[in-house]
Amino acid sequence: MARTFAWRSAAAAALVAAAIAACGEEVTAPGHCPELCPSDSLQVVDTVITGVVVFDTTVRGFTNLRFSPILVVADQDSLKARPIIRFQPLPQRWFPTADTAGVPIGTIDSIDVYLRLDARDTLAGNLRFLIYRLPALLDSTATFASTQAYFADSTYIDSIRVDSTTRVANLHLVLRDSSLTDKPLIAKLTPQAADSFVLSLGIGLRADSHTVAVLASGETAVFPSLKYYVHALADTFSTTFTVIPTFDTWVSSPDVAPVPAQTIVVGNQPSARAFMRFQVPSYYVDSTTILRATLQLVPTRAVRGFPNATFGLEALPVLRYFGGKSLLIGDTVVTGYGTATVGSSDTVSLEMGGILRLWRGVSADSLPRFVTLRTANESFEIGQIDFAGSAAGANAPRLLVSFVRPFKFGVP
Amino acid sequence: MRARVAAVLPLLLALGSGRAAAQGSVFGLRGLGWLGRGVSARSAGTEGALSLFDPQMTANPAALGHWRSAAGWAVVAPTRRSFEGPSGSASLQTSRFPVFGFAAVIPTRTVVSVAISDYLDRTWTITRQDSTVLRGVTEKYTEAGRSIGGVSDMSLSAAYRLTPDLMVGVGFHHYLGSARLAAQKLFDNVVYQQAAEASVTDFSGAGISVGVLGTLQHLDVAFAARLNGSLHSTNTSGQSATTKLPNQLGLGLRYLPVPGVFLVGSAEYAGWGAANADLLAAARDGARNTWSLAAGAEVLSVSLLGLRTPLRIGYRWRQLPFLSLGQGIDESAFGGGFGFSLARGRTSVDFSFEKGSRSTGAEQETFSTIFAGLTVRP
């Protein structure tokens, strides 16, 4: 009897287990139209909406050259730029081990001038960075014109040559006291007591053709520096002093032009941003599913900037509009992206579908339909692009929208 | 006999664990859906040939007269399907609960029952790859359509035994259910956001059925008819529709050639053509009148491990009502099963397995299903 019961239990358990094991859900089949195709499907429609930007304004000054991570050097016809760098005072005494009185600097054995090259145009061969000694106490009031006189033969120290294929490099100018040619240069690079032992340098460039290059500033981890190898008067002790910038910027000519009328301007340094107010028919925003929305902007002149380069553009929705001090929504999901090519006058496209989807179901009173346009790497970007503004008629910004109409699920 | 049953058991188990299958089909995207089979595990063993004699099913309310005490029953039916078509192949599986219900005996000679069974299955998912030209560029995309749900038949039925050999019955049917629909389009080009829409369609309808079941010496005869109204559909997108449901007739015969062995056959007709006009008006594929034929055998004189273990076998063929591009879809299957009677007849467990196919044009779907049913008579 017990054996029979065990058999029954085992059989029932096995059958139940088999039934449970067979359960599952996988209902996806490959469709084949028209035989196995739902009678309705999502239809994608393309349309162009003109006159979507009803207001625009450009504000410049979102970056400060004083705190810029780059130093621009250029000798182009359209842009001449020269970095000026003021270094820390050179210490005059150091304290070797067990010497509490300290040891004053006697002689400078050698100096290493360090610059970081971040970008250059390799089409311009035989690039050299020219190093000038400037008055020690230059400050942010310096302009291209006011410093022009200091970039002269009398203040010229030496140059650093850059290999023609090198785009990014650590540049060093090493001067040794043992070299007869270097000895006077070391004297030029030695800060004087009259200047409170502060040294300022200016950087120019020269190449086979007019060009532009970018150096890292004191705001970065690869800041310019001067490394002094010094000996005590008695030549018993030696040490190394490294001084770094306390102030750096660059001066340029011509000055950044004012924003032309009816123009949307983005980029350059100090950087400019455009603020645009959109008026998109609510049908597209609230009733459709927007798959893609592309803002097309027509340049009014060729894009300026680093030769043979492209730079990114970003469109960010505005949370609260206060002109240049507007609050922006920085979520990358809703950030629109586009690129501009230096030298090109082609229409620029920015994908901003995420912004239109953000506006869905939200009134313009709650979330203003403003968008700000800026360069993607605003602090590093010297490119500028001018677009036709909202009042430019046929060249005004327009929106290409790919959308799905509200889907009518069929019944029965 | 025991040895034979012992040999069959592992075979069925192996089939069951390797391939399950039952209701639901990709063809359910046509018309009102895939026509469900509210079949018990016992009747499934004969491929539905026993339907009009089975008190667990709603096909013939007169069959409720077989109950001599209160009873409750439920069936689970996992199904595996293999779909093949010009656009590719896929292995699919679903699990359904074709029927469950309970019955009570009201003295004297009257039985009432409430049961819920599958009527129309609208669970399917279709994906396909295609391309379209957007902004002058050919963009590839994957499109998916999905429907989850269906229409159930909730019936309140009663049967009365006029004589020990003659039973009559009547049933009221409420068709209700819903389907969640979703459509999605996903482009290969990530610049395009995916589009997704969803909605819910609710269904309701009603019908009434009558049946009679009589015994003539070695032959049982069952007849049932059902008059249906219309199925009302309302979608959350605001659309609504009315579709005429079919009137149905069924005839079943059960012959006892030798004691303990039944040969059964049934034929059912459904006038789904009545829905044709409504479906065409809704820009759907039309519908046709359909026949369902089934034949099988049930052997009751078998026991295993001291338990009464009926064995069943059957074959069925049926027409599905909803057309695909004007073409009909036919379905056929064969199967078999067995049952255990436990607790001195107060509990029975039935298992069936079927394997079949349905096709239209170049698309074909083969399926295999396990039916597992539990009946309790406290």
Image (cartoon, coloured by chain):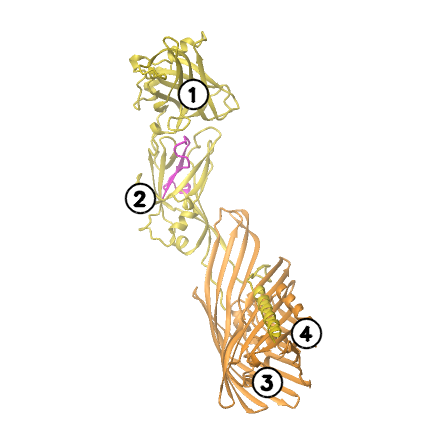
Q: Mark 2 belongs to which subunit? A: A
> Marks 4 and 3, Cα distance to the nearest angstrom?
33 Å
> Disc 2 or 1, which lies upstream in sequence?
1
Residue drawn 44% across and 32% down?
A: A303
- Circle 2: element type: loop
> Marks 2 and 3, Cα distance to the nearest angstrom?
78 Å
Which amino acid type corresponds to the residue marked 1 in the rendered image? Answer: Tyr
Residue for badge 4: B5
Question: Who's orange, chain-wise?
Answer: B
Residue B218's image quarter? bottom right
Which amino acid type corresponds to the residue marked 2 in the rendered image? Answer: Tyr
A20 w.r.t. A119: above or below:
below
A380 w.r.t. B330: above or below:
above
Residue for badge 3: B223
Residue drawn 57% across and 53% down?
A: B130
Q: What is the magenta range? A: A371-395
Q: Residue furthest front?
A: A2
Which amino acid type corresponds to the residue marked 3 in the rendered image? Answer: Phe
Determine contact: label 2, label 3, CB under 8 Å.
no
Q: Nearer the viewer, mark 2 or mark 3?
A: 3
Residue for badge 1: A114
